[in-house]
Image (tube, helix red, strand yellow):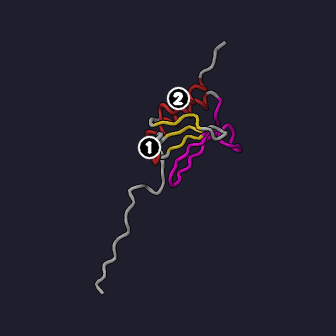
Amino acid sequence: MNSITPFPQLHSTPEQVAFHRTELTLILSLYGRMVAAGEWRDYGISTLRDVAVFSVFRRTAENPLYRIEKRPKLRNRQGQYAVIGIDGQVLKRGHDLGTVLRVLERKLIRAVE
């Protein structure tokens, strides 16, 4: 009757992946500039078990124009950050969020007539 019941193993990975405050600062800075330019109007944030997604919308009731994803499991391979277009195509993937977001900053550059 002196049997020992071990505690369940604690997992080193969190139950949900989320964006850190510094990551959100970079993303929301770009979002604010795109809203001021009239390109974007709404966003949504999803935190799931293996991915965190920041979705950008032109209008609320449509599919996202872009998805900014964070997948920590890909940290040592292709990079944990990715920008995915409306058609599901990966536009940029990398280890640094700032360089990955530059693919969207090019949309702000317009020729002045």
Residue that numbered label 2 is attached to:
102
Q: Quadrant of residue 44?
A: top right
Secondary element under disc 1, as helix, strand or loop, is loop
User: Which quarter of the figure is the N terminus placed in?
Assistant: bottom left
Residue 72 to residue 38: above or below: below
Of the residues under marks 1 and 2, which one precedes in the sequence?
Answer: 1
Q: Does the magenta stretch include residue 94?
A: no
**Residue at 50% of width from left, 40% of height from top?**
81
In the picture, measured across the screen, residue 40 lies left or right of residue 101, that is right
Residues in magenta, as a range: 38-66
Question: Residue 35 versus residue 104: which sits nearer the camera?
Answer: 104
Q: Position of residue 71 (x, y in %)?
A: 49, 46
| Residue in the picture at 57% in, 30% down | 104
In the rendered image, residue 14, in percent from the top left (x then y), is placed at 43, 55
Mark 1 or mark 2, whichever is nearer to me: 1
Q: Name the residue under label 1.
A: 75
Q: Where does the image place residue 98, in percent across and percent down from the top left?
A: 47, 32
In x, y percent, where is residue 105?
56, 27
Tell me what residue is drawn at x 64 percent, y 41 percent.
Answer: 88
Q: In which quarter of the image is residue 42?
A: top right
For this view, does 13 lie left or right of residue 59? left
Circle 1 packing at 10 Å, graded few (<14), some (14-19), many (20+), is few
Q: Is residue 6 above or below residue 35?
A: below
Q: Which mark is residue 49?
A: none
Judged from the image, the secondary structure of the residue bearing numbered disc 2 is helix
